[in-house]
Amino acid sequence: MEQRKLGRPTDQRDALLRNQVTALLWHGKIQTTAARAKEVSRIAEKLLTLAIDSYTDTVEKVETRIKTETDKKGKRTQKEIKVAIVNDGPKKLAARRKIMAVVYDQQEQRAKGETKAAFRGRTEHIYHPLLEKIFNDYAPKYARRIQEVGKGGGYTRVLKMGFRRGDAAEEALIELV
């Protein structure tokens, strides 16, 4: 398929679209020009479809670990603990890597009034927050939507907002449905 040039060299155009797709998936909506919105919509739909098709592919295994505990008297005891570990399956891992190649790594921000310890506890095991949001929030939501409606696609909506003052470029609001 033909891609719009957007009046920029290839490297700048790719960076611009990656940045806007990342912002769209992180915030849920962005305002930009109509031509950019159409391109961002195409890319975001493909990434969401990739996540929806693979988000259930997980591999679970149980490991036995030895934990050493010390009581009040200084006596050490060892206990065997079984730990269930859930990893990505091959299909989900491939999808995760493809998505990581397109979007930028977005870092979690501390909420207003949140303590440093609470923030650290909330984000302790989250290494790529945007990917976790895509696979844990968006993919199940849109998979349910596909089952209810009976067809895939249509995850984004482009609303034209009128013309911008200054250069009269047509603006659009793009949002996740």
Image (cartoon, rainbow, N blue to C red):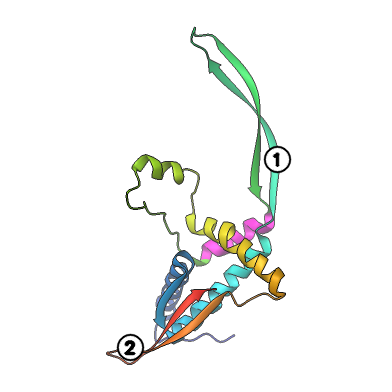
Tell me the distance, in whole angstroms, between the alpha carbons under discs 2 and 1: 55 Å
Where is mark 2, residue-wise? Answer: 164
User: Dividing the picture into quarters, in which one does residue 57 lie?
Assistant: bottom right
User: Does the magenta run of residues contain 23?
Assistant: no
Q: Tell me where residue 35 appears, x and y as whole percent.
A: 45, 86
Pointer 1 local density, CA inside 10 Å: few below 14, some 14–19, many at least 20: few
Q: Tell me where residue 67 appears, x and y as whole percent.
A: 59, 23
Q: Secondary structure at mark 2?
A: loop
The residue mark sitting in front, 2 or 1, is: 2
Residue depicted at 65% across the width and 44% down the height: 86
Where is mark 1, residue-wise? Answer: 61
Task: Please count the marks in the image.
Answer: 2
What quarter of the picture does the C terminus occupy?
bottom right
The region drawn magenta spans 90-101
Residue furthest to the left: 166
Pointer 2 local density, CA inside 10 Å: few below 14, some 14–19, many at least 20: few
Q: Secondary structure at mark 1?
A: strand
Q: Main secondary structure of the magenta part?
A: helix
Give the amino acid at mark 2.
Answer: Arg
Front residue (pair 123, 161): 161
Q: Tell me where residue 72 appears, x and y as whole percent.
A: 48, 10
Establish if 71 lies above or below 86. Answer: above
Q: Tell me where residue 155 appears, x and y as whole percent.
A: 58, 74
- 122 horizontally vs 47: left or right: left
